């Protein structure tokens, strides 16, 4: 029974990569290209893959529990962009 509880707790936490994506989103970047450079250098991801992961995180309740301010801000931005289309 205890093993099932531990596995359940592990599933509720974000992985290191997901936490790193949210941490990068909390930062400000000085100019064009700086964010994409940070994505490549710090996370080792192509920007396209990064944004795919980020978009999936916005719908993940674990991400919301981990960083509600960032996730809610990004959800609002996403919704605004969708409304403009």
Image: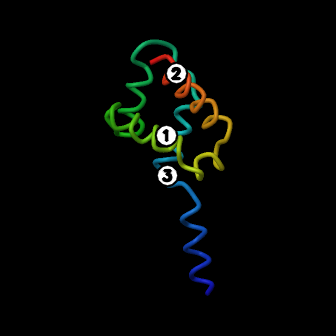
How far separated are the C-alphas under marks 2 and 1? Answer: 25 Å
Whichever of labels 3 and 1 marks the residue nearer the N terminus, that label is: 3
SS for callout 3: helix
Is 35 located above or below residue 14 in the figure? above
> Pointer 3 and pointer 2: residues touching (CB < 8 Å)?
no
Rendered residue at 49%/47% (across/down): 18
- The residue tagged 2 is 83
Mark number, residue 21: 1
- Name the front one of labels 3 and 2: 2
SS for callout 2: helix
The residue nearer to you, when weighing 15 against 38, is 15
The percent position of residue 52, horizontal first and vertical second, equals 38, 38
Seen as rendered, the residue at the extreme top is 31
The residue nearer to you, when weighing 70 against 43, is 70
Rendered residue at 41%/34% (across/down): 51
The percent position of residue 63, horizontal first and vertical second, equals 58, 47
Is 83 located above or below residue 31 in the figure? below
- The residue tagged 3 is 16
């Amino acid at each position: 029974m205890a093993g099932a509880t531990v596995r359940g707790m592990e599933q509720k936490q974000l992985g290191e990569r997901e936490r790193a994506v949210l941490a990068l989103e909390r930062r400000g970047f000085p100019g064009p290209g700086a964010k994409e450079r940070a994505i490549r250098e710090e996370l080792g991801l192509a920007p396209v893959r990064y944004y795919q992961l980020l978009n999936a995180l916005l719908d993940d309740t674990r991400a919301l529990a981990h960083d509600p301010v960032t996730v809610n801000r990004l959800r609002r931005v996403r919704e605004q962009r969708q409304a403009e289309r």
